[in-house]
Image (tube, rainbow, N blue to C red):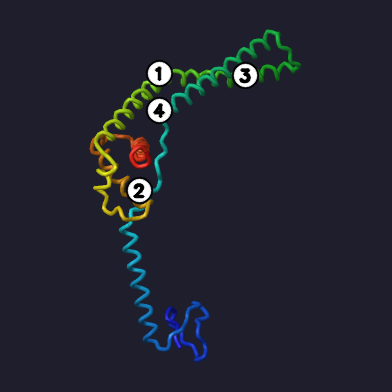
Amino acid sequence: MWCPKCKNEYVKGITECADCHIPLVETLADAEEFYEKEQQEAFNEEEQEEDVVTPKTGGHIYVKKETAYEDMKSTAATFLCIGTLGIVFLLLWGLGVIRLQMEGYMKILMFLVMGTLFVVFLIIGIRYQMRLKSVKEEAGSEKQLTEEIISWFLDTYSASDIDAEVADTLVGEEQLYFQRYEVMEHCLSSRYPDLDRAYQDHMLEELYGRIFQN
């Protein structure tokens, strides 16, 4: 008796390989035939996997310019507020309005450390504040571009137009999604070749939802 996988020989009476845990065959020729069949099946599976459209890895993280503007506005306000309040506190402390019992050298050290910290906060807040205008303009431009892309794509392509370009619609829902995605990506890139990758992925998700899920 022979194991068709590891090709170890066993005495009669044993029906299963102790290592591979599969049924034994009577001759070595049967074992060779089993091995060749197994290799061919593995090869066929690999070929099928190559034909399948697989999801993209390492997706790009997209943050809307409008969201970035609001975050920057909040950050600028926070740093400016903390820096201003901190400096006011130090001034009131130095003038004796706020009394804290502390040794002279410790008071000087605290003034230096906290003063430096609050000034840094003010500088950071001012720098963020100075960038707000340009980010707000970028957010407005992005919003206008988004509306333009959605209007153009929905007027130009329908679900049937996209499915007509899909190689095989008789596949699972997940694979159909990726095939449609590639068709839509090609259409969008043809009209807008210079889009940021993360923004393009965001737009494709938005367009897919409007076309196939509504």
Numbered-mark total: 4
Q: Amino acid at mark 1?
A: Lys
Query: What residue would you read off at disc 4?
Result: 65
Q: Name the outermost residue toward the right.
A: 101
Q: Nearer the viewer, mark 3 or mark 1?
A: 1
Q: CA distance from mark 4 to mark 3?
A: 38 Å
Query: What residue would you read off at disc 3?
Result: 112
- In the image, what residue occupies the spot 37% across and 74% down? 38
Q: In screen coordinates, is 210 left or right of 121? A: left
Label 2: state its secondary structure: helix
Q: Amino acid at mark 3?
A: Leu
Q: Amino acid at mark 2?
A: Tyr
Residue 199 on image: x %, y %: 36, 35
Dot 3 or dot 1: first in sequence order is 3
Q: Are marks 2 and 4 in contact (CB under 8 Å)?
A: no
Query: What residue would you read off at disc 1?
Result: 133
